[in-house]
Image: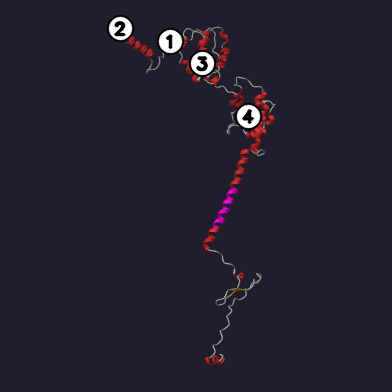
Amino acid sequence: MVQEEMTQRVKNLEQRLKNMQGLAGQKSISFKYLCMFLDVHLSPGFKTPKFEKYDGHGDPIAHLKRYCNQLRGAGRNEELLVAYFGESLTGVASEWFMDQDTSRWYIWDNMAHAFVKQFQYNIDIAPDRIFLSNLKKKPTESFREYAIKWREQAARVKLPMDDHKLIIVFLQAQEPDYFQNMMSAVGKSFSEAIKMGEMVENGFKTGKIISQADLKAATQAVQIKSDNFSDTNEKVEEIMMTSGSRRGPRRASRRYEQPRLFFDNSPEHYYPLQNPQHSVVPPQYVAQPPKHPRRRSRASQNLQQPP
C-alpha cells in the first residue's frame, strides 16, 4: 500500500516536471504559464463583448480606439483592459501578443505603446494621393467593384479630401478611355461618378463607344494587310523580272516584223513601215544583182585598140 502511494507520487512529480519543461522541448502547458493574467478577476455578471478582430493590417491606433469603446464598462480597470486585449486580435497580431512578456506591462500604456510600435508600418504605408492616382481597375472586376475599392482606400488617407479633390484624383486614376468619357463628373458627387463610369463601361460592351485599344488594333491590322499586299506585288514583279532575264529578250511579233532586202556586199535596205492593221505580212524576197557582161574576144579587143 505504501509502495503504491510512493509510485503515484513519483508519477505526479514526473508529470509536473514535464509540464514545467514542456513537451518535446516546447513551452510549458501548465495553467500558471499559459494564463497571462492570473491576478485579474472578473466582476460578477461580466460578459465578454464580441470584439472586432485586428489581424495586423490597418491602423493600430484605430483598433485601440474601437477596443476601448467596446470595454468602456470596465472603467479604470486597466488590468482587465490588458487581459482582454488579446481577445480582439487574430492572425499575426494574436501570435505577436501571445509571445510577449506581460510582466513588462505594468499599466495599459505600456501594452498600447508596444502594440502601436509593432504595427506602426501600417501607418507609414497608409495610402496617399499618389497611391490613389496609381490604383487602376483590374480587367477581372467591374467598374462598381473597382470604384468601391478605390473609395475604401481613399478613406484611409490621413488628410481627408473634399468631394471636388476626391473626384479629381479619381479621374486621374482612370485609363484614357474612361478619363475622356468621364470629364463631366468634375463637380459632382462620387456616387454620380460611379453611375457615369458604369454607363461608359456598358458603352464599351455594346460597341457604342470604341476604345482606343480596339481602334489602334484595327489600324494596325489594316496596316499589316497593306504591307503584306505591297510585299506580294514586289515579289511578283521580282519573279517576273528574274524569269524574263533567264528566258532572254522577247522577240517582236512576226505580225509587225519588217521585211528586209539582201544584196551581196551591199548595205541592207528595208521596206517602208507597213500599216499594223494588215493581218498579212508582205512576202519577203531577195533582189539579185545584175549579171556581169560577157568577156569580148581577143580579136575584137585588138580591133578597137588604136594603131
Look at discs 1 and 2 and give the one toward the viewer.
1
Tell me which amino acid carries mark 2: Val
Q: Position of residue 205 (x, y in %)?
A: 64, 37
Q: Which residue is mark 3?
A: 117
- Judged left or right of residue 11, residue 56 is right
Q: Quadrant of the C terminus?
A: bottom right
Q: Which residues are magenta?
A: 225-239
Give the number of the disc on residue 32.
1
Q: Secondary structure at mark 2?
A: helix
Q: Secondary structure at mark 3?
A: helix
Look at discs 4 and 1 and give the one toward the viewer.
4
Q: Which residue is mark 2?
A: 2
Front residue of 17 and 237: 237
How far is disc 3 from disc 2 in space, using C-alphas? 58 Å
How far is disc 3 from disc 4 in space, using C-alphas? 34 Å
Q: Main secondary structure of the magenta part?
A: helix
Callout 4 touching callout 1 (CB < 8 Å): no
Q: Secondary structure at mark 1?
A: helix
- Judged left or right of residue 186, residue 12 is left
